[in-house]
């Protein structure tokens, strides 16, 4: 059935009726509006889940672009205005300021004096491979007990590390030492609520289905199917995938954090 046929059947079978005020569903938009207000609020002031460290995504976005050798028009004026609007709970202004600042991200100009441009960047793996010296590959039997044990050990190691890291993420080493001294063990009962592990579990889910034929598109679809939201680089990538952009463009388009690990 063609799209026009689906639409025709939908509308031709709809029987008119007068809705009561309760049935008109306009009030449902209040929840939608609240969702977007909460979402934009997190961009301006939030705390790292797991550790409670303060963070400001909009400030981080400006910093990320400046680190990549760009200048953003009116960045600091808009940051000041946005901070004030957020503190006052003025979401009308905050949405406007956020949109303007993000537009300036898209139109950031190259800072020719930045050291960033002294480094060679690669747009794709093929170009990188031409200039890299890789060690000789070795055959690995993935069916041996040794390989399985090593794989399990690798996963356990990173889960253990992530469980430790999520307790203290976002604080300086100086402040951590002043608060806890020399850290030699978990500072609280560990858990595995960690966004980094979440993305890897999504990969495993896709790998379970596709095996060694897995593609970046398969992983992207696993992301949007299993992960409702991300942060900084990952969040922008998720938004792009939901809008139909697949890797590698999903990690780079309109993403001020596109050189962070999650993109």
Image (cartoon, rainbow, N blue to C red):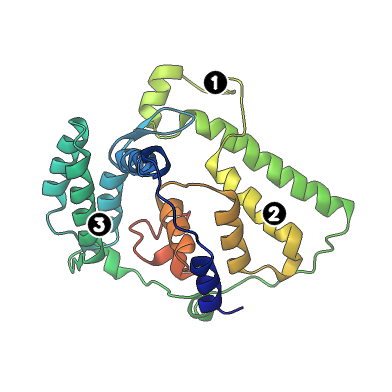
Tell which of 13 and 111 is nearer to you: 13
What is the x, y in percent for residue 56? 30, 40
Question: Nearer the N terminus, badge 3 or badge 2?
Answer: 3
Question: Which quadrant is the N terminus positioned in?
Answer: bottom right
Count of numbered tags: 3
Tell which of 227 and 73 is nearer to you: 227
Q: Residue at x 58, y 23 (%)?
A: 186
Can you identify the residue that label 3 sits on? 102
For mark 1, does the 10 Å Cα neighbourhood hold few (<14), some (14 to 19), or many (20 or more) residues? few
Question: Nearer the N terminus, badge 1 or badge 2?
Answer: 1
Do the residues bearing badges 3 and 1 touch, measured as CB atoms within 8 Å? no
Q: Is residue 160 above or below residue 75?
A: above
- Which quadrant would residue 120 be assigned to in this image? bottom left
Q: Residue at x 25, y 52 (%)?
A: 62
Residue 4 got which mark?
A: none
Can you identify the residue that label 1 sits on? 187
Tell which of 12 and 50 is nearer to you: 12
Q: CA distance from mark 3 to mark 2?
A: 33 Å
Q: CA distance from mark 3 to mark 1?
A: 38 Å
Tell which of 119 and 235 is nearer to you: 235
Query: Is residue 22 something one can see in this rendering?
Result: yes
Q: Left or right? Give the position of 239 relative to 63.
A: right
Label 3 element class: helix
Can you identify the residue that label 2 sits on? 205
What is the x, y in percent for residue 149? 81, 47
């Amino acid at each position: 059935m063609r799209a026009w046929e689906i639409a025709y059947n939908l509308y031709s079978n709809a029987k008119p009726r007068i809705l009561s005020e309760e049935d008109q569903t306009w009030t449902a938009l209040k929840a939608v509006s609240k969702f977007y207000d909460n979402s934009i609020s997190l961009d301006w002031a939030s705390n790292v889940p797991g550790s409670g460290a303060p963070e400001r995504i909009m400030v981080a976005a400006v910093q990320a672009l400046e680190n990549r050798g760009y200048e953003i028009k009116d960045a600091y004026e808009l940051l000041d205005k946005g901070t004030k609007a957020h503190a006052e709970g003025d979401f009308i202004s905050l949405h406007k300021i956020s949109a303007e600042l993000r537009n300036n991200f898209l139109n950031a100009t190259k800072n020719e004096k930045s050291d960033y441009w002294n480094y060679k960047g690669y747009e794709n793996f093929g170009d990188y491979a031409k200039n890299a010296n890789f060690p000789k590959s070795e055959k690995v039997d993935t069916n041996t007990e040794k390989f399985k044990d090593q794989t399990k050990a690798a996963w356990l190691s990173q889960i253990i590390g992530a469980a430790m890291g999520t307790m203290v993420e976002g604080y300086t080493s100086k402040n951590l030492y002043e608060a806890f001294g020399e850290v030699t063990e978990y500072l609280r009962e560990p858990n595995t609520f960690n966004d980094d592990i979440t993305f890897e579990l999504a990969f495993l889910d896709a790998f379970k289905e596709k095996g060694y034929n897995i593609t970046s598109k398969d992983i992207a679809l696993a992301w949007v199917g299993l992960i409702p939201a991300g942060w900084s680089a990952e969040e922008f990538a998720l938004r792009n995938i939901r809008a139909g952009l697949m890797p590698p463009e999903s990690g780079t388009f309109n993403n001020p954090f596109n050189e962070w690990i999650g993109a």
